[in-house]
Each structure stands twice: as structure tokens, then as C-alpha cells.
Image: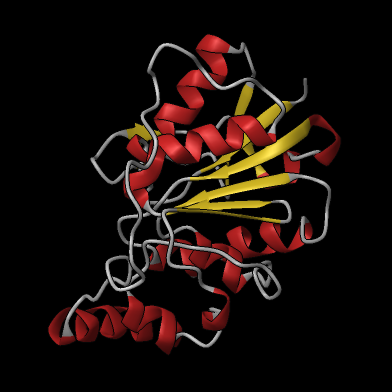
């Protein structure tokens, strides 16, 4: 089996992908490489300092059958790192599974990868409606959505995200209760997240400051 690539950026969430990455390595012995725009120290959302072992210019599509994008506590720095966006643009339309959780579909959207893909995310509704590069009409308010070669998920569904990715890779799902799965149906209203007027203003102020740089 080919390797799995994991993309990281400032404030990324290890917790949202560790269920997947641990299962891939420990249960299925799948090798992984961690990619970033540089080999400088990147702090995760919980303050861990991580250095990618490869940069995007070292990525070779033939070596990987999946790219995993963790969620991001504050997605703005990653959104405005053009190396992130250019890398994602370079794999648009390529034969690779892309698994993206929580807020990271914002990066895919900015790179134009979700223009004709149904997806879900944990991005607040105000942001999704305001940022014109996010194809709001393609959002499906469900914990996990699989469309074409994309798997997207809301952050709380990290186990289901892991299961769907493992299934899509053609690996049997772990047995013995490692993953519990979604236990009930959700309404669209329950999975439409509002950040509130004050927090939205703070977000847009920071976003617009990056736009001016």
C-alpha cells in the first residue's frame, strides 16, 4: 500500500486526526509523511511544537494514496500562507483521496477543490456565507460526507472520519469497539454552527488585516 500524507499548519488539531493516524500505523502498518510549507516549528492548537519531515516541493503524487488535513483552531494564518493553497491547487483533479476535518475544508475551498464537491465542515455559518471562495451551496449538514474522492467531517465525528477514510482506502474497519460511530440522526439546524455577532466581527477584523498584508 502507498503511504499517507498529513498536511499541517499553525494551530492544527492533532486530536481530530490521531484516531485515524494511530489506526493506520498501529493496526495497518501504513507509513505516513508529514508535510508543511516549511520545516520551521509549527505549534498545534494545544501548544505542541511540531516539525514536518517534508515540504510541499518534496511531495510526489505517485507515493501517496491519501492526503489528510486536520482541523485548525484559528484558520486565518494557514489560509494566507500561499504555499498551502498552491500545494492544494497542484493536486486538484488528481487521483488521491483527500480527507479533511473540521475547519480545514476552508483550505480546500480556497484552492478551488470544492467547487463541484458536496462537503461538510465545522466552520461557523457566518464565515461560510461571507467568504466568497466557500461554495456555500455545496455544504451538507451531516457529521461526515463522502463525495467523489473527498471525505469531510465535523470535528466531533473524528472516529467516523477515521472509519470512512480507512474504508475508502480499502482497509477493513478496526474491530473490537475502537470506533463507536454516529449514534443518532442530526437535523440541519443542529449542525449549523453560529459564532455570534461579536465573535464574527473579531474573526473578520483579523481576516481583513491579513488581506491588507
**Horizontally, is 95 left or right of 40 in the view?**
right
Q: Where does the image place residue 198, in percent across and percent down from the top left?
A: 13, 84
Q: Nearer the viewer, residue 31 or 27?
A: 27
Q: How is the image coloured?
A: secondary structure
Q: Nearer the viewer, residue 124 or 210?
A: 124
The C terminus sits in image quarter: bottom left
Q: Is residue 93 above or below residue 202?
A: above
Q: Nearer the viewer, residue 21 or 137?
A: 137
Residue at position x 27%, y 85% in the image: 205
Q: Where does the image place residue 183, in percent across and percent down from the top left?
A: 33, 41
Q: Where does the image place residue 209, in percent across and percent down from the top left?
A: 34, 83
In the picture as drawn, the residue positioned furthest to the left comes out as 198
Q: Where does the image place residue 155, in percent across and percent down from the top left?
A: 35, 50
Residue at position x 56%, y 22% in the image: 173
Can residue 42 be seen in the rendering of this structure?
Answer: no
The N terminus sits in image quarter: top right
Amino acid at each position: 500500500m502507498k503511504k499517507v500524507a498529513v498536511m499541517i499548519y499553525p494551530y492544527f488539531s492533532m486530536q481530530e486526526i490521531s484516531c485515524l493516524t494511530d489506526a493506520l500505523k498501529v493496526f495497518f502498518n501504513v507509513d505516513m509523511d508529514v508535510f508543511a510549507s516549511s520545516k520551521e516549528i509549527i505549534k498545534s492548537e494545544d501548544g505542541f511544537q511540531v516539525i514536518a519531515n517534508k515540504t510541499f516541493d518534496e511531495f510526489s503524487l505517485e507515493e501517496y494514496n491519501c492526503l489528510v488535513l486536520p482541523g485548525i483552531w484559528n484558520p486565518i494564518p494557514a489560509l494566507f500562507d500561499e504555499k498551502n493553497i498552491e500545494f492544494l491547487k497542484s493536486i486538484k483533479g488528481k487521483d488521491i483521496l483527500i480527507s479533511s476535518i473540521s475547519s480545514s475544508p476552508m483550505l480546500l475551498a480556497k484552492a478551488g477543490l470544492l467547487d463541484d464537491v458536496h462537503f461538510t465542515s465545522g466552520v461557523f455559518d457566518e464565515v461560510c456565507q461571507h467568504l466568497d471562495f466557500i461554495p456555500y451551496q455545496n455544504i451538507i449538514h451531516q457529521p461526515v460526507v463522502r463525495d467523489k474522492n473527498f471525505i469531510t467531517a465535523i470535528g466531533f465525528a473524528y472516529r467516523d472520519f477515521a472509519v470512512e477514510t480507512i474504508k475508502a482506502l480499502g482497509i477493513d474497519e478496526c474491530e473490537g469497539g475502537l470506533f463507536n460511530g454516529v449514534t443518532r440522526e442530526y437535523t440541519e439546524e443542529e449542525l449549523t454552527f453560529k459564532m455570534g455577532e461579536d465573535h464574527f466581527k473579531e474573526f473578520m477584523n483579523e481576516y481583513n488585516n491579513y488581506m491588507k498584508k
